[in-house]
Image (cartoon, rainbow, N blue to C red):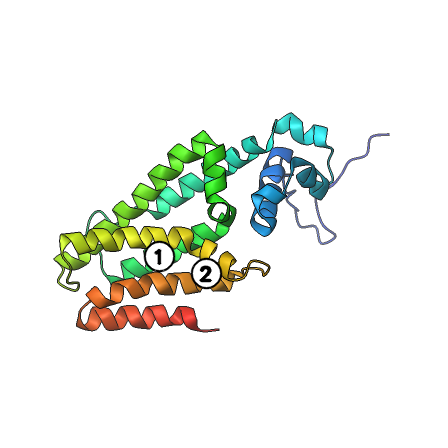
Amino acid sequence: MLIVVDNQDRHGVLMEKKPKRRTRERIVETSLRLFNDFGEPNVTTTVVADEMNISPGNLYYHFHNKDEIIEEIFVVFEREIEETLAAPTRRLADVEDIWLFLHLLFEQIWKYRFFYRDLNDLLTRNRLLEIHFKQIMAHKVHTATILCEGLVSTGVMRATTQEVRALATNVAVLASYWLSFEYACDPRGKVESGRIGRGVYQVMAMFSPFLLDEAKGLLEKLSREYLKP
């Protein structure tokens, strides 16, 4: 006997069936969560398979080893962070651009925090990450430089070319290694997402001495929001 399934609820409303996520996508999502929570070195492919309740063979059908999973995650991370690092091109930057840039940058760092937590180890093991992360670091410095130059051009920031370069480099360094600092301060603790706001505050504080009048007041007002519990 043929059974016809009616895709309607008891009120006669047509119900849309959500497409099942493919196993490959679930492996990537689960791996990212576990890498972020426990650190990439502490998570094996067997752990990922157990977490998903699938066999190791099923996982190996999609990814031959953990490095392939890491590279798949990195492709998405690189695309997203490059979009974040796109500086305004049709106008000069203002103070709120600095705030937005740092806020979005730290959001991306938190979303893919295992890259930053285990950065040195990953770069020594994976040539692809080594090459591309170097480009990302350079892009961070470049974007920060453009934003600073925009503030100088509009007269709200006073800094020499050398000071702008130093500030832009410091922004990239502090943003990239802030999580390492947090982990070093509390190695056995869990870094909560709220603590990433302290990183945004610290980076914004580096701009303050170079800003003038209203711009300085606005930046300090925006930065203080990250210190609220």
Q: Amino acid at mark 1?
A: Leu
Place of residue 80 in the rendered image (x, y in percent of width and height, measured from the top left)? 41, 43
Q: Nearer the viewer, residue 132 or 214?
A: 132
Residue drawn at 47 percent across, 54 percent down: 180
Q: Does the image show residue 48? A: yes
Determine which quarter of the picture holds residue 42.
Answer: top right
In the rendered image, the quadrant that contains the N terminus is top right
Check the image and report above or below for 51 versus 71. Answer: below
Residue drawn at 41 percent across, 61 percent down: 199
Residue 61 as seen in the image, left or right of residue 226: right
From mark 1 to mark 2, how far is it between C-alphas? 11 Å
Residue identified by numbered label 1: 102
Place of residue 138 in the rendered image (x, y in percent of width and height, measured from the top left)? 30, 42
Check the image and report above or below for 203 versus 59. Answer: below
Q: How many marks?
A: 2
Residue drawn at 59 percent across, 42 percent down: 41
Q: Nearer the viewer, residue 203 or 19?
A: 203
Does label 1 or label 2 sit earlier along the sequence? Answer: 1
Q: Crowding at label 1, few (<14), some or many (≥20) Cα neighbours within 10 Å? A: many
Q: Amino acid at mark 2?
A: Ile
Place of residue 136 in the rendered image (x, y in percent of width and height, measured from the top left)? 35, 41
Determine which quarter of the picture holds residue 40.
Answer: top right
- Callout in the foreground (1, 2): 2
| Helix, strand or loop under label 2 | helix
Check the image and report above or below for 8 versus 183. Answer: above
Residue identified by numbered label 2: 196
Check the image and report above or below for 218 versus 166. Answer: below
Q: Nearer the viewer, residue 199 or 22?
A: 199
Residue 102 as seen in the image, left or right of residue 109: left
Q: Nearer the viewer, residue 77 or 188?
A: 188
Residue 160 as seen in the image, left or right of residue 119: left
| Helix, strand or loop under label 1 | helix
